[in-house]
Image (cartoon, rainbow, N blue to C red):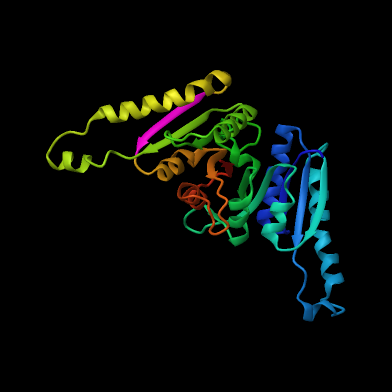
Amino acid sequence: MTRTITVGIDGSPESRAAAEWAAREAGLRDLPVRLLHVWEPVPAPMAEDPILGTETHQYWTRQVPRKMGEGLRLRHPGLEVSCDQRSGPPANTLVEAIEEAELLVLGSRALSGLGGFLVGSVGQSVIAQAEIPVILVRAGEMAADEHVLDPAGIPSAATAFRPVVVGIGIDSPDDNVLAFAFEEAQRRRTALHVVSGWQLPPYYPYVLAAGSLPDEGVARRKAADLTRVILPWRQRYPGVEVIEVSRSGSPARHLVDVAHDASLVVVGRRIRRNPFGAHIGAVTHAVLHHATAPVAVVAHP
């Protein structure tokens, strides 16, 4: 089966933004786009109603992927777009339907006042279960938002891409997350900012209380550790400019700060087989709630 970029759609502004992002990404990857609409069967008391029953509901829900597909083909000539519809619980049905997908793209409303993503229960469940990268795109996201301003200071999709940003843990960097980030930066011909946040040793508060200056050697060692981890990836992707960011403090806060002007933010999610809980991870959860760029969540062992 041909691999696709699959988009979970429901006709909302956020799912339309997700479909547009998927179409642009498909152009970079030379892949088709699959629009997937999941609808839940109407409750039994309504199923026999001639106006609100199953057949009527099915008819109208079929219009969602069809109309969105027609729009994508018009706006992206040459893009191969297929439409699919499934019935069942949205989260589980989406996860079951993406086994052959390269990526899953979902839309999200922006969080008022915070600028990040409002990830509902379906989105959180999908992110927690999916073992392929899941991209979250906010409603209103446009192609120009991923590019630097033109010389006149006007948003444009014809200028260079903004950088890609990835957050990693020095103690347990994952190849899946780094490979995805480097590939995305290479496709966009842009820089990759690799961000690592770390905490000072537990004895430091006592050292500072005694009036001693903090040991800058800790910062130097952490920066050297990051350089050592990234060196093989620099050699593997010589065309990607890499900017290393090693800072003391909250990894999520530093990642959000650096990602303010990014075209894409990449974070990891550890795969857990325990069926209980969301299993997204504290850093990923924080980034989803505060990042303004699209966020890619990459599952790893």
Which residue is at the front of the view, 134 or 116? 134
- Number of dots carrying numbers: 0
Q: Is residue 139 visible?
A: no
Quadrant of image for the N terminus: top right
x and y, in percent, of residue 215 in the image: 22, 30
Residue located farthest toward the front when viewing the structure as drawn: 274
Please state if 251 lies on the left or on the right of 53 as rendered. Answer: left
Let me know if residue 246 is in the magenta part.
yes
Residue at the location (85% across, 77% down)? 51
Q: Is residue 17 visible?
A: yes
x and y, in percent, of residue 234 in the image: 52, 21
Quadrant of image for the C terminus: top right
Let me know if residue 9 is in the magenta part.
no
Which residue is at the front of the view, 272 or 69? 272
Residue at the location (62% across, 45% down)? 135
x and y, in percent, of residue 163 in the image: 54, 32
Please state if 251 lies on the left or on the right of 44 as rendered. Answer: left
Figure check: 43 above or below 172: below
x and y, in percent, of residue 81 in the image: 81, 44
Residue at the location (76% across, 32% down)? 30
Residue located farthest toward the left when viewing the structure as drawn: 210
Q: Main secondary structure of the magenta part?
A: strand
Which residues lie in the magenta part? 241-248
Quarter of the figure with residue 191: top right
Figure check: 258 above or below 116: above
